[in-house]
Amino acid sequence: MPKSSLKQTLKDLETKKISIRELNQDYLKRIKEKENLNVFIHFNEENVLKQIDNLEKDNSAKKLKGIPIAIKDLFCTKSMPTTAASKILENFNPTYESFVTQKLLDEGSIFVGKTNLDEFAMGSATSTSFFGNTINPLSKDNEPLAPGGSSGGSAAAVAADLCLGATGTDTGGSIRQPASFCGVVGIKPTYGLCSRWGIAAFASSLDQAGIFSHNVEDASILLQSIAGFDQRDSTSAKVDIPNYFENLDVDLNGKTVGIPKEYSIDGTPMEISQIWEDAIKVLEKKGVKIKNISLPHTKYALPTYYIIAPAEASSNLARYDGVKYGFRSNEIDSLDEMYENTRAQGFGREVKRRILIGTYVLSAGYYDAYYLKAQKVRKLIADDFNKAFKECDFIVTPTAPSAAFPLNEKQNDPIKMYLNDVFTVPASLAGLPGISIPFGEDKNNLPLGIQILGKHFDEQQVFNAALSLERSYE
Amino acid sequence: MNNLIKGEKHDWEMVIGLEIHAQVKSNSKLFSSSSTKFGSSPNSQVSLVDAAMPGMLPVINKYCVEQAVKTGVGLNAKINNYSVFDRKNYFYADLPQGYQISQYKYPIVGEGKVTIDFKDGTSKDIRIVRLHLEQDAGKSLHDQNPSKTYVDLNRSGVALMEIVSEPDIRTPDEAGMYISKIRSILMYLDTCDGNMQEGSLRADVNISVRKPGDGYGTRCEIKNLNSIKFIKQAISYEAKRQIEILESGGAIEQNTMLFNTSTGKTRPMRNKEEAHDYRYFPDPDLLPLEISEEEIVKIKSSIPELPDELKNRFIETYKLSNYDASVLTAEKKTSDYFNESINSDPELKNHAKLVVNWITSELFSLLNKNNFDLTNSPVSPENLGQLVKLISTNEISGKIAKDVLDDMFSTGKTAREIVDEKGLKQVTNEEEIEIVIMEVIKDNPKMVQEFLEGKDKLLGFFVGQAMKKTKGKANPKILNEILLKKLNK
C-alpha cells in the first residue's frame, strides 16, 4: 500500500475527501497491528480519540489540523508520560509541554504516542531502552533488524506508516542514522533553530530537535512548524525562519557541492561508496559543480564527540537522584546509599558507561588533556566546515557506514556501536544542519541514506538539494 | 600597631582571607523568575527550573548581572566584559540540578580593593581577588523528623555574589572591620540587604599562622559564618589551635572546618583527601556573559555616593575626624539620618560634632536599649537637630537634654514642645541664680563652715542643692561662678 504524504493528506483533509477521524482511525488501526515492533513506549487509544473529539469541535484553521504525529519520548508532554526510555523516569508525568511539542499542538496536530529511543538518547540502535528494543519495520521475518538510534522509535513509526511525521532529537546522528536505517527522511537542523526547552537533556551543546517524514516536502512543512526563537533557551537562535516549503527549488544549476575526501573511509561497504558516487553523478547532471574539499580534522570528530557528549551528560543526568521525582531505590540507609542505589538501579549500562566516561574526562588532572583538548578540536572541526563552505553551497556524504544491522549485533561492543556516528558526528560538533534521505539499497534490499549538510541556518539549501536528489531517485 | 599574638615560644602572625557570600538584592532568582522573598512557606517559591525538572533551562536574570557590576564598581574593581558560567558538580539533597551554576575561570568582576579605618585614624587597604555570581542551594532540614531530612528549595537558585579577598587581613578585628565595610558598601549600593541573621551575608574564613617574616603556612577554611562576632571568635580560636599544634612540633592539616557557635570551637568537617572534585566546566546551557563598555558606563552613572566618598565629604564639610566620619558612614541609615538632621537647620553646620555625638552615643544607646533601629526611630532626624540646636544655643544644658531626649523617645514630641511644657529652659539670669544660692547657703550653715575650713569637696554638694532647687535648669557655668563668689565672701 502506498504511503500517503503529509502534503497530500493536508489537501485531502481540506477538500473533505477524508475526515480527521477517518484519517486517524486508519493510523490507529495500523499502530495496533504493528505492536510487535515496539515502536511506542506510550500509546493510549483513548487519548488519541479525545484529541480527535477536541479537534472536531475546533473551528479555527490550523496548519497541521488532525495530522497524526509521533513524539520521541525525550520531549516532555503534559498529556502523556515522559520516560526518556529510562527506568529512572518510569512514571514521570511532566506538568509542562516542551517548546517543540507545544508548537505542534498549536498547529492542531494529533499526538499518536511517545516513541521508543535509546535510554536518554544514548545509543545507535534503540537497544539501550529500558522498554526493550524497537524492531526496524523493514526487517525480514527471520532476522529482526535495528532501526538505528537513538530516535529509532520515531524513524520506525514513519517507516511503518504509523504517523505522518515524527519528532526526533539528534546529538551525534540520532535522527539521520535511524532515518537512513529505516528508509525515511530525517533532518537535524542547525543547532539553535528549535528550542531545547522541555527536552530531557543528553548533551546540551549538541542536542537538537528535528523531524522524520516520508519525504523532503513533508519534512520542510514540519520543520517550519517546530522552528523558532524561545527566550527560555539561551542557546536558541533569533533568526528569521523562511517558509521552507514555499521556497523549495529543485533547480540546483550553478550550485557547488563539496565532496569531502576524508569521508572515504577504509572498510566502508562498496554499496555505500556506490550510492555516494551515484548521488554525485545525479547532481553533476543537474548542473551542479563538483568540488573536492578537505575537512582535515574529520578523523578526530568521533573521539572528540565521545568526550564532549559524555562530559555534558554526566552533569545533565546528575539531577536524576531520587530526591525530587522519578525512581528512588527502596534500599536506603543513608544519603549516599540513596544516590548509589537509585542511580545504579535506575540507569542502564550504556548510560552508566557514559556518565563514568564523562566524570572521568572532567576530573581534576584530566580536564585539560581530555575536555579542554576536545573543545579545541571541536573548534578546528567547525573551522574546517567554515572554510569548506567558502567554496561550496552544500556537502554530500553517506549518512551511515552500513545499512540496518541485526538487532543482536554490536550489543556488546560499544566502540563498534559508536562508529555508526562517524559521518554524522562532525556536523553535530559544528552545529550544522544535515538531512538524510533514502538513496539506494544494499544487496539485501535494505535502504541506504545520503546525507546533505548545509551552512548554519541554510536549511533551505539543504532541503532544495535533498528534494532534487529525492526526485531523481524516485 | 602590633598585630602579633604571643605563643609559648615566640610571636605569631595570623594570615586571613575571607570569601563573602552576599545574596543579590533582586526580586527574582539568578536563572528563574521565582520570588526570593525570605521566610515564605517551604517550597512555595520553586519554579520548574529551580526544581531541575527534565528539560528545564536556566536563563540569566539581567538585573542580577547589573547588581554584580554595580558591586564591582563599589569595590573599586575591574569589571570583566567577558565572563563565563560554569557548573560546579556535586551531589547533595538540596542541590536539585546536581550542580551549582557558578563562575570559575572567568568571573564577572576582577581585582579591586576596600579600605578599613582604625580608631587611631590610620587605615588599611584589603585587596579583592574577584567577585563572581553563583546560585544558592536549597536548605536541608534535619530537625523536623527523627528519621527523615526535608528539603526546602525556596532558596535554590537565589543569586549570590562571592567576594574573595586576598589574605591581607591580620587580626580578628580587621576581619570584622573588613566584612562590616563590605556590608556597608553593598547596602549603600542596594545590591544586598546585608541581613546576616537571615543569611543574606555569610563568610568562609581562610586562616593560617606564621612566624613574622615567614612565607604562608598551611591554611584551614572555616565554613559558613553568619555573624561578625562568630567570625572573630572562630578566627581567635582557630589561630590558637594552629599555634598550639605548631609549637608542640606538629603540622597543620589543610582541613575544612566547622565552627560551633555554642562552644566557640572549630572542628574538622573534611580533610584535603576528602575534598570534592567539582569537575567545573562551562555550562553549555548558557552563553558567555558579555557586557559592553557602554553598559558599564551606564551602570556606573547610576551609582550613589559610597561610604568612602561620603566620609571624605563629611570630613571636609564638617571638619569631623576620620573616625567619626567613618562611624557615620558605616551604615547608610546612619549617614542618611545625620544628613537629614544636620540639614534641618542651617545653624547646625557649625555644631556637626555635637550632632554626631548625640546620634552615635545618646540616640544609639536609647535605640539599642529599646530594640529599635534608626529606620524606625521615634525621634526623627529633624527633632534631633532641634534638640542639638537647643543645646548649642544654651537654651538647655546637656544634662537636661538627656532627659528631653528620653521624653522625645517615649512620647514622640519635639524637643521644643517638651522644653516648653515642662519649663525646662535653662536659667541664665544671674539674679535668679543668686537668690537660689543664697537660700542654699542660708539653709546649710554647718556645711558652709566646713567648706570655709578647707573641705573643698563640699562645693559639689552646694552645686547639687542649687541645681535641685532649679530643677536642673540653672546654667552650670554661671551657677559655679556665683557660688564660689558667694561662699568665699
Image: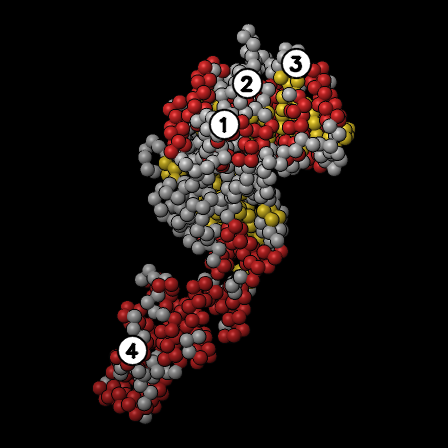
Disc nearest the viewer among 3 and 4: 3
Residue at 39% from the left image edge and 49% from the top image edge: B37
Instruction: For marks 1 and 4, give the CA distance.
Output: 92 Å
Q: Nearer the viewer, mark 3 or mark 2?
A: 2
Which chain is home to disc 2? A
Q: Quadrant of the C terminus of chain B?
A: bottom left
Q: Do labels 3 and 2 share a chain?
A: yes
**Numbered disc 1: what chain?**
A
Q: Which chain carries label 3?
A: A
Give me the disc on residue B417: 4
Quarter of the rendering occupied by the N terminus of chain B: bottom right
Q: Are marks 3 and 1 on the same chain?
A: yes
The residue labelled by disc 2 is A2
Please report contact status of discs 3 and 1: CB closer than 8 Å, yes or no: no
* Image disc number at residue A442: 3
- What amino acid type is highlighted by mark number 4? Glu
**How many numbered discs?**
4
On the same chain, marks 1 and 4? The answer is no
What is the secondary structure assignment of the residue under circle 1?
A: helix
Residue at the disc numbered 1 = A12
Residue A137 sits in quarter? top right
Identify the image quadrant of residue A91. Answer: top left
Residue type highlighted by circle 2:
Pro
Discs 2/4, front: 2
Q: Residue A348 carries which label?
A: none
